[in-house]
């Protein structure tokens, strides 16, 4: 397929251990082949930025067929200007003007590079062509090393207003003497199992052991209970119709979702597992790009412009 650069954009998902990229086409947010690489072995800003550029060239078979690039990054991050303020992840990017550095590498104007929060990208992808398509009030929750969140009304990402915590972030809301992320994360599952058995295991391994290891099953059950209680407190005022779950832990919903659903009984919110899986942030980056320009076009079944 020959791509029209005005209707095609290079999209990235910058994760905790790898980078993925693809070309997203404006027509139904279709993705071209997705390419990914682990983070560079040498952790420097130059090595990382060179890897982003090389991956983009590979994903687009050159750069002539795209109008720019949209990057989904974890926070804290100044998405308006393209500067990372992360210290716990990718510390070698701290304070770097990524827009300028990448524009130099791509040979583009700085305005051709845009950035958005990874959890926002996840929810936008599900709104554009996934589990939140046509939903008026939706929340996206990503479950992994931490818990990411995003709130949307009629296709808009919202970061304030009734029922929306500051920035749309729930990970650091108070919960049981700590914060939500202490009890809803991979480390929570691992810690729960280790307290029961004295053995340290990774979450992926525990998911495989559930059928034969009661302690593993109990760790996921406890995780689900905390997820449901935490979401009930964090989301009740927003009153979402749908809560879309993504991230690595969401791949095994049968292990924790029944416990979470019991805690949300009466809230009238439906849990849905991501239909786009790893592609959701890439599709969402495309949605953000094509609606940033200001044309009011359908996003899923809703006609809205994505809020900056």
Image (spheres, rainbow, N blue to C red):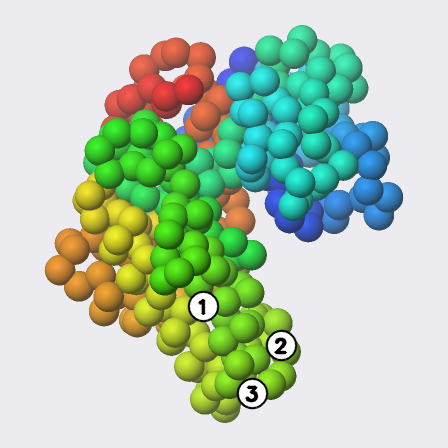
Identify the image quadrant of the N terminus.
top right
Can see residue 184?
no
Marks 1/3: CA–CA distance: 22 Å
- Name the mark nearer the viewer: 3 or 2: 3
Could you say which is closer to the camera, residue 89 or residue 304?
Answer: 89
The spot of residue 231 in percent (x, y) is 30, 54
- Name the mark nearer the viewer: 2 or 1: 2
Neighbour tally class for label 1: few under 14, some 14-19, many 20 plus, Cα within 10 Å: some
Tag 2's secondary structure? Answer: loop
Marks 2 and 1: CB-CB under 8 Å? no
Seen at 79% across and 32% down, the residue is: 45
Q: Quadrant of residue 120?
A: top left
Tag 3's secondary structure? Answer: helix
Residue named by callout 3: 197
Residue named by callout 2: 201
The spot of residue 304 in percent (x, y) is 29, 22
Residue named by callout 1: 252
State which tag comes first along the sequence, 1 or 3: 3
């Amino acid at each position: 397929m020959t791509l029209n650069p005005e209707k095609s954009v290079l999209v990235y998902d910058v994760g905790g251990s790898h980078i993925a990229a693809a070309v997203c086409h404006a027509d139904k947010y279709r993705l071209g082949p997705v390419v990914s690489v682990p983070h560079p072995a040498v952790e420097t800003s130059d090595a990382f930025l060179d890897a982003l550029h090389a991956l983009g060239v590979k994903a687009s078979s050159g750069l002539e067929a795209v109008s720019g690039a949209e990057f989904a990054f974890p926070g804290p991050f100044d998405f308006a200007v393209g500067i990372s303020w992360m210290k716990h992840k990718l510390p070698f990017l701290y304070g770097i003007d990524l827009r300028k550095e990448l524009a130099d590498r791509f040979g583009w104007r700085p305005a051709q590079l845009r950035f958005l929060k990874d959890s926002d990208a996840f929810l936008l992808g599900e709104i554009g062509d996934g589990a939140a398509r046509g939903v008026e009030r939706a929340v996206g929750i990503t479950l992994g090393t931490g818990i990411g969140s995003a709130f949307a009304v009629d296709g808009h990402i919202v970061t304030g207003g009734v029922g929306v915590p500051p920035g749309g972030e729930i990970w650091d809301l108070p919960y049981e003497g700590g914060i939500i992320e202490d009890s809803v994360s991979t480390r929570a599952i691992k810690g729960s199992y280790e307290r029961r058995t004295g053995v340290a295991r990774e979450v992926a391994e525990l998911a495989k052991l559930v059928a034969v290891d009661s302690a593993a099953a109990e760790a996921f059950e406890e995780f689900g209970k905390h997820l449901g209680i935490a979401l009930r407190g964090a989301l009740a005022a927003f009153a979402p119709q749908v809560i879309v779950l993504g991230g690595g832990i969401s791949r095994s919903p049968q292990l924790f979702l029944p416990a979470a659903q019991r805690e949300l009984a009466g809230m009238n919110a439906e849990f849905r597992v991501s239909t786009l899986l790893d592609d959701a942030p890439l599709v969402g980056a495309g949605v953000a790009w094509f609606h940033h320009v200001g044309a009011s076009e359908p996003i899923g079944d809703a006609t809205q412009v994505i809020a900056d």
